[in-house]
């Protein structure tokens, strides 16, 4: 039924549960799994000149967090008797929801799996602002894991 599953991950506990579900669905359906980590390339606006070293440090830390989140998913995919093909991607977008929806279209995903709450600060106190926006804007079904 599903050929290409997109897992939106940020390394949080909720996305770890979503990863387990996504890997199991990919194994069951023989689908490719794409793990996506979205980073905001402009996390803050500063007054005056932008410090290029600060931006470089921020992006290096974001790449490290993405690699850690992807490693967790890769470990699930590489477990014995799983055999799920994984593609790890990092996207830059000011809005995580927009980055996920754009990747759905770019990758031709036919299902999105994501956690109900991630690392989005105060905005996550409701269902999860990213999860609710993706569910509203996605052209394909969205499975939100709690």
Image (tube, rainbow, N blue to C red):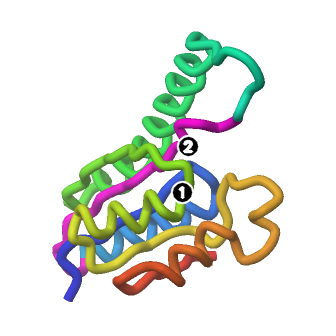
Check residue 105 in the rendering and tell me which mark sits there, or answer none: none
Q: Which residue lies at the image location 23% right of the left edge and 63% below the top edge?
A: 107
Which residues are the magenta region?
Answer: 28-44
Q: Position of residue 146 (x, y in %)?
A: 64, 76
57 up-or-down from 86: above or below: above
Q: Residues within 10 Å of mark 2 (few under 14, many from 20)?
A: some
Q: Earlier in the sequence, mark 2 or mark 1?
A: 2
Q: Which residue lies at the image location 40% right of the left edge and 64% below the top edge?
A: 7
39 and 68: which is toward the camera: 39
18 and 129: which is toward the camera: 129
CB atoms of marks 2 and 1 within 8 Å: yes
* Image-based side of 128 in relation to 72, left or right: right
Q: Residue furthest front?
A: 48
Q: Quadrant of residue 122?
A: bottom right
Q: Position of residue 84 (x, y in %)?
A: 22, 61
Residue at image mark 1: 96
Element type where label 1 sits in the image:
helix
Q: Position of residue 24 (x, y in %)?
A: 35, 73
Q: Quadrant of residue 25?
A: bottom left
Q: Residues within 10 Å of mark 1 (few under 14, many from 20)?
A: many
Q: Report if residue 33 lies within the magenta region.
A: yes
Residue at image mark 2: 40
Q: Quadrant of the N terminus?
A: bottom left
């Amino acid at each position: 039924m599903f050929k290409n599953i997109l897992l939106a991950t940020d390394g949080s506990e909720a996305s770890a549960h979503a990863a387990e579900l996504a890997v199991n669905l990919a194994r069951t359906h023989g689908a490719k799994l794409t793990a996506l980590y979205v980073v905001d390339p402009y996390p803050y606006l500063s007054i005056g000149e932008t410090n290029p070293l600060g931006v470089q440090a921020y992006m290096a830390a974001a790449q490290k967090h993405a690699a850690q989140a992807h490693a967790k998913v890769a470990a699930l995919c590489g477990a014995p008797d799983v055999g799920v093909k994984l593609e790890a991607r990092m996207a830059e977008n000011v809005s995580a929801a927009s980055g996920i929806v754009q990747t759905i279209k770019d990758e031709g995903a036919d299902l999105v799996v994501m956690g109900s709450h991630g690392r989005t600060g105060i905005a996550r106190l409701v269902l999860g602002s990213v999860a609710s926006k993706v569910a509203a804007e996605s052209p394909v079904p969205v499975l939100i894991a709690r």
